[in-house]
Image (cartoon, rainbow, N blue to C red):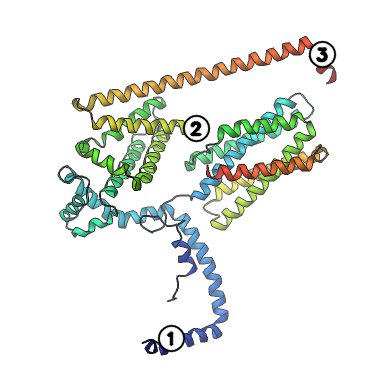
Amino acid sequence: MLARYLPLLQCYGNIMGRTTIIARPLLASNFSTNRTTSQDANASAQSEGRREEQDSSSKEDDVKFKIFNAALPLVHQLGWTKECLEAGAESIGLSKSSHGIFEHGGTSFVHFFHRNCNKELRKIAKDEQIESAKSDELTKVHQLLEQRLQMILPYLPQWPQAMALMARPHSSLDSYKLLYELADDICFFAGDRSLNATWYTKRAAVAGLYITGELSLVQDKSANCDESWRMLARRIDDLRKVEEFGGSCSRQQEILKDIAQSSLTLIRNLTGMQSYQRNSR
Amino acid sequence: MSLRLSPALRHLRASKFTCNNCLRKKHTKISDEVHGMLRVDHAGEFGANRIYAGQMAVLGRSKSAALIQHMWDQEKEHKKIFDDLMVKHRVRPTALMPFWHIAGFLLGAGSAVLGEKSAMACTVAVEASIVEHYNDQLRKLANENPEKHAEIMAAIKKCRDEEQEHHDTGMDKGAEQAPLYKAMTAAIKVGCKAAIALSTKV
């Protein structure tokens, strides 16, 4: 059977051989252009990062978004599942199997929902110019958190299923990443520009607040989920108190430093070292 | 039509540039590598600030005080430059900031306690490491895409030139006459390398 292909291979080998011999200078230049093309491709992978994101969003993400939008109203009957995505795809005229664009079914559905909500939040923060508002940082954090938590309100009865899907081990990495991005966005748009340990503590606090809010909403039985909003307001007040305490601590630190310095001077005076220093200068 | 993927495409197939979900190019604005570079530079300038603060705390009333203060002021400017770049690109700062806060001060104060020439030797060692590190970064950025990274490269160049100045000033002020000069500079350079490796990732 191989014999059938042997002439073809020989022919190919001849062509390659001949081209190698005749076109060696050409190939050499090709190779150098290959190197620069790889550099260029490398560079374009970097520089077109932003355009790539927009481009891919116009092709693949577009279809994904259409199916997602069509499937969302059906979540109440079918839950965050592959079947819901199938029904959504069918309702806009695509084939049932196009749900496969969401690789992991229900989990990808919830993941996309979170990504979309985070995008919406960024849009709201930019449109309402929250960054430049007069209120203090914690008020803005409160505002943004409430906006974000309100986005899950329409799907509250099925939200425990969504939370369970995101809590699975194989999707936990993704959920941590999403939570990190959410906390980072909220802190950034609330005006935080710190670049030290407080960067971490603020984002951890916001992430914790989001999770607490989500958990509270899921089991809230009051009208309009008022209990959860009140709980959130109380947590923000707690954070405010912690901030004030931290500020007063650093003020105490200054006083302690002064006390330490003056006691050192006192000791130097008593032991006569002060005059020694003055004489040696 | 080649039988194998061309070097360009083969490079793209590697996971550094492909998104794990869709195998297309990764959706990033500036790459994680450049994020790491900004993070470590910011940490470095913060550390340098703390080293000079430590030196001033001990040598604040000596002959070298004015010189150390001048170098410290320049480091403050450098830190401001990287602060702005970090905020602009939304880069996460290093988690080891509290550690560098203390370690930098101890290094500066420790070297100053050994004498003015030792303080200069410490400066020389640190600045030599930093200049080498900045040169590596400039090479990497220039290889990738000089136009895209123009702003970052300009910032690094400015800082590198002034750090080189500090290094030369330190040498002029007799750093090499410090006791145990070779051992001290070798140890500090190793410490700086370790710090750079850590802060790029953590």
Q: Chain of mark 3?
A: A
Comes first in the chain, label 2 or label 3:
2
Q: Are marks 3 and 1 on the same chain?
A: yes
The N terminus of chain A sits in image quarter: bottom left
Residue A146 visible in the shown view: no
Task: Nearest to the eye among marks 3 and 1: give it.
Answer: 1
Query: Mark 1 — on which chain does it sit?
Result: A
Residue B36: where, in percent of width, then height? 53, 46
Whole-angstrom CA distance, mark 2 to mark 3, is 44 Å
What residue does disc 3 label? Answer: A275
Q: Position of residue A105 (x, y in %)?
A: 26, 52
For the point 24% across and 49% down, the residue is: A68
**Image point (59%, 42%), residue name:** B41
The amino acid on which the numbered mark 2 sits, given as a three-letter code, is Ser
Instruction: Give residue B83's position: percent from left, percent from top.
Output: 54, 37
Residue occupying the far top of the picture: A270
- At horizontal 45% and vertical 85% (from top left) the residue drawn is A12
The residue labelled by disc 2 is A194
- Residue A46 position in % (x across, y down): 47, 55
Q: Is disc 2 surrounded by few (<14), some (14 to 19) or many (20+) residues within 10 Å?
A: some
Look at the image and tell me in which quarter the C terminus of chain A lies. top right
Which residue occupies the foreground of this view, B72 or A154? A154
Assign a secondary structure to mark 1.
helix
Disc 3: CA contacts within 10 A as few (<14), some (14-19) or many (>=20): few
Q: CA distance from mark 2 to mark 1?
A: 65 Å
Disc 3 is placed on an element classified as helix
Contact flag, marks 2 and 1 (Cβ < 8 Å): no
Q: Quadrant of residue A226?
A: top left
Q: Read off the residue under disc 1.
A: A9
Amino acid residing under circle 1: Leu
